Amino acid sequence: MDDAFHLQPWADLRHLRHFLDSLQPGRLVVCLLRKDLPFEIPNETRVYLQKMGSTAVEFLGPGMTWTWVWVKGGHTIAEGVTFPTARDMAPRHLTHFEVELTPKTEFCPEWPHNPHWEKRRDFCSRYERCGDLCDCQKPYVFNTTEQKLESSVIENAVVVMVAHRVPDLYRSIKSLATAEGFNKSRLRVYTQTRDVELEEFLHLADVSLTVTNRSHDLVSTHIARQIVFALNDTLHKQPDADFIIFLEEDVRVSPDFFVFLNRSAELLREDATLYCVSAHNDLSYPHTSYNAEVVLRAESYPNYGWMVQRSFAEEMVEVMSGIQTEFDWDVVTYYHIRRGRECIIPEVSRSQHFTFGGAHVSQWDARRFYSRKNLNEDSTAVVKNVSDLKNETYEAYLNSLLDKAYFINSEEISPCRDDFFHLIPTEGQEVLVLFFYTDVDINLFRINIQWKTLAECLGTFSIESREGHHGLYRMRYGPAHLFLIAYPASPYSRFKPADIGVFNATLEEQRYANYRSLPQKMVYNLNAVDEVFGATKFKSRKIT
């Protein structure tokens, strides 16, 4: 058996397609539905799997279990479904099948016969999921030329990655290699325990690997210890590194990733009120961001591609090395290390979290919040006016925008309406402002029902509040600025006119937001399934 895709509720089609594209033709593939379906499988995912040859996927519904075995580029070997009763979920089932193995032959005989290609041939004959790395006709060739940015401030920066999944790491490194200014000799990869596949892959890529030998029973602390070790080790082994760029293995970067970091580095160095440059904007969606030239200031989490100065990395190591209890490294950094400092972030993200799922992210979250996010694909894009993010200058700029803003009265026009933006006179408006109720300490604010409801209704990140600037959250509606301001906690609350209402989610609006956040459920006609296929035929069987 070569590989399996575990289909969870609302698995994203792009994840599924990438998984299948990473397999070579002729591979035996297993698709599993191993958890109950509380929600509908996306229609596009059903259609795609039907085209691949599945018979049962069209009828999968709540309480069912499903297994499908097939050959990529070939035919179905076996497919099985078990059905629920009125009270219980479907039981597990065993699917028995037989396949005829083909004689072993030399992998990709058309490749050159020299040490590098012999190592790659051996690697690809034993491991899967690396796509065009192992394509016999058009194999990916690692870029060995080192590019230097013009007027580079980050020439001595080191890129640090913590990784253990080769397919994800390969995808991330490929995006790095196409980014202008990438220097492979300044890339350091860390992993928790020795992994032969990872070692062999990075040997092919000519990238160094260090084993941390750091672990913990609690997932959050385990991840934190890997990051602390990686930062500390880099600081000691790279004494010339004035900036540290941190990436996770499941992050893809834009073509101008290093250009963006480089243009922001000088301000990071000069402005003591900043602590990082983050390539990721949690509020950057296609309908909330569009101008790739714009940069913002925000109280941002360090996540999915970020850069700090050496001095801040040393602070992180010092503080987190002494923590003995369970902790999330990014939360500790945000609340206890940055001390009110902010990050430079782009309006349009320069990195994308392409996760299938992980310690804190399910496939459901990945589909809802991460797969839809914006990512700059324009290699010629250049962020402008970075110096305008100096604290005093930026405050003056925001004040000038708020002085001429159109204030949305949420008591008259609720953001939880399908026609919300059609009811706002946007023509000629440069700035739209909506106030939402929050009276807690804005420096500690993470989530309340107002923010969650508002974010869900506007179709943006709602797990918690992200990318705020003293309680002001800056997005776009078309070319117009859209500001969400926490009232009365934010100092920008002083701009609220007396006759403008504050969004305070009603029960009806909360229900609407919950409805928007859930996929539609299908009504399953199990009798129709039985009539077409015969439920008994989906028990374990051999297919010839």
Image (tube, rainbow, N blue to C red):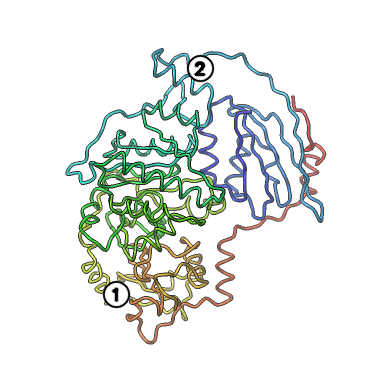
Residue drawn 26% across the image and 46% down it: 259
Q: In this view, does 176 lie to the left or right of 533?
A: left
Can you give x and y, in whole percent of width and height, for residue 94 in the image? 76, 36
Q: How many numbered marks does the figure carry?
A: 2
Which residue matches tag 1? 402
Could you say whether the residue bearing mark 2 is in a helix, strand or loop? Answer: loop
When the figure is inspected, residue 406 is found, relative to residue 68, above or below; the finding is below
Residue under pointer 2:
107
Label 1 and label 2: CA atoms lie apart by 64 Å
Q: Which amino acid does label 1 sit on?
A: Leu
Secondary structure state at the residue bearing disc 1: helix
Q: Where's residue 513, x and y in %? A: 55, 67
**305 left or right of 147 in image:** right
Q: Nearer the viewer, residue 151 or 244?
A: 244
Amino acid type, mark 2: Phe
Give neighbour class at mark 1: few <14, some 14-19, many 20+ (Cα, 10 Å). Answer: some
Compared to residue 141, the image places residue 481 above or below, namely below
Tell me whether the residue at label 1 lies in contact with that at label 2, contact meaning CB atoms closer than 8 angstroms.
no
